[in-house]
Amino acid sequence: MNNLENVSRSVSRPTLMRLPGYLNYLKLRQKDELVNISATKIASDLKLNHVQVRKDLASISSGGRPKTGYDIKELISDISTFLGYDNVNEAILVGAGKLGKTLLSYDGFSDYGLNILAAFDTDKNLIGNTINGKPIFSLEKLKDVCKRLNLRIGIITVPAAKAQKICNLLIDSGILAIWNFAPVHLHIPDNIILQNENMAASLAILANQLSERIQRKI
Amino acid sequence: MNNLENVSRSVSRPTLMRLPGYLNYLKLRQKDELVNISATKIASDLKLNHVQVRKDLASISSGGRPKTGYDIKELISDISTFLGYDNVNEAILVGAGKLGKTLLSYDGFSDYGLNILAAFDTDKNLIGNTINGKPIFSLEKLKDVCKRLNLRIGIITVPAAKAQKICNLLIDSGILAIWNFAPVHLHIPDNIILQNENMAASLAILANQLSERIQRKI
């Protein structure tokens, strides 16, 4: 049953960020052959505030019942639908270096409704190869492929100094949402959606704080 | 030449997050056989404010010279040393599922001074195997391995519902810094360093904003 008709699609960013965690948790519970679950139980297992969990779930599903709680299957369906995991989002990736290859090889994106169709690169040794069944094309073909397939999501895994140029090319090719893995700040127009994933920065913070911690102890 | 002796190890978090980007950029420039580079040129290429770049670099290197700018090789060395990329940080990973396997296979971490020594899992089909030369051990051996090798960094790639338990086990095993890829909020003591990497949440935001954008247009 899809309860989304009565529910607004607008939820807060923190709620949105928690939804994949609920989904991940509910799928594990489903394997335990559990049928119903309460917001209180979810909150307790995920170490979240139960008022917050109740609010989060009410914003994307009207399936909650007093005492019995939520039907797990229904709640999984509601969250999946809300997050757009049912409608597969097709994306292309630019930069088939170490990180690009790793993302192409990762089979977990399909759990989140993302399918990387192809990669683009300027390296002649890479062009024409496939990784995990995904072809690597010449960067020159990017615009044509994006326009022809009406693609909306582009993933950037090129070096920092090349990222802005690729970003501009993606936007010029009709891409509306950019997932940027290059360790650099991108300048984009207001109508473009940008999500940064900076693993190098995370590691820098981790390593720096760790070395400070260890030095203080000595 | 190492100029770090005159430089404080404390820089702001935004500066720290930009440092890997500079490093990445400088390594590319070095390939172009360039010897010196000015903060203005770096700022222009990376689309950053030149005052900010000047300040960032001055905080980790005293190698800047009027007119000639920085010696690229020296600046690369100063940033690498500051970020601890010279001293390899050894880490273990818990959860050898799809994401765990992908991170074990990724060869780019060594560029950031991170070396994942081994993985731990409860799945008997995985224990005893190696991925990219890294062994998968039984979770029961985690504490012993961490203590014996005096390890400080733990990477969590288990499902959301299991992450807190693993987090507690890591802390109990002497781990000081946790890189968490599970889509869940972890509760940790004040003395533990935590860095969250939530790709599912990033994708949820991207997909949700994209679907809103497309619906508005229709």
Image (cartoon, coloured by chain):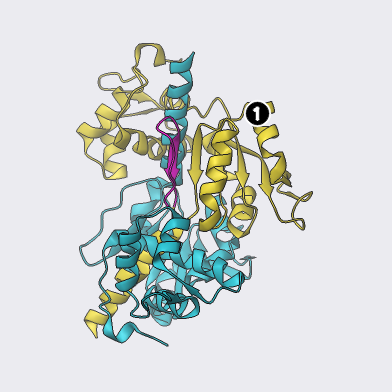
Chain colours: A yellow, B cyan
Examine the structure image and report whether residue B124 is included in the region drawn in magenta. Answer: no
Q: Residues within 10 Å of mark 1 (few under 14, many from 20)?
A: some
In this rendering, the answer to whether B8 lies above or below A136 is below
Answer left or right for A78 relative to A58. Answer: right
Give the camera-side residue of B192 and B209.
B209
Provide residue A154's location: percent of width, then percent of height.
56, 39
Give the camera-side residue of B26 and A135.
B26
Q: Which residues are magenta?
A: A183-197
Please state which amino acid type lies under the numbered disc 1.
Answer: Lys
Q: What element does badge 1 sit on?
A: helix
Which residue position is annotated with label 1? A147
Name the residue rendered at 61%, 69% in the picture.
Answer: B32
Examine the structure image and report whether residue A192 is included in the region drawn in magenta. Answer: yes
Name the residue rendered at 53%, 77% in the picture.
Answer: B35
| Residue B183 visible, this angle | yes
Q: Quadrant of residue B62?
A: bottom left
Q: Quadrant of residue A205?
A: bottom left
Provide residue A119's location: percent of width, then percent of height.
67, 45
Provide residue B153's location: percent of width, then percent of height.
39, 69
Name the residue rendered at 76%, 51% in the picture.
Answer: A127
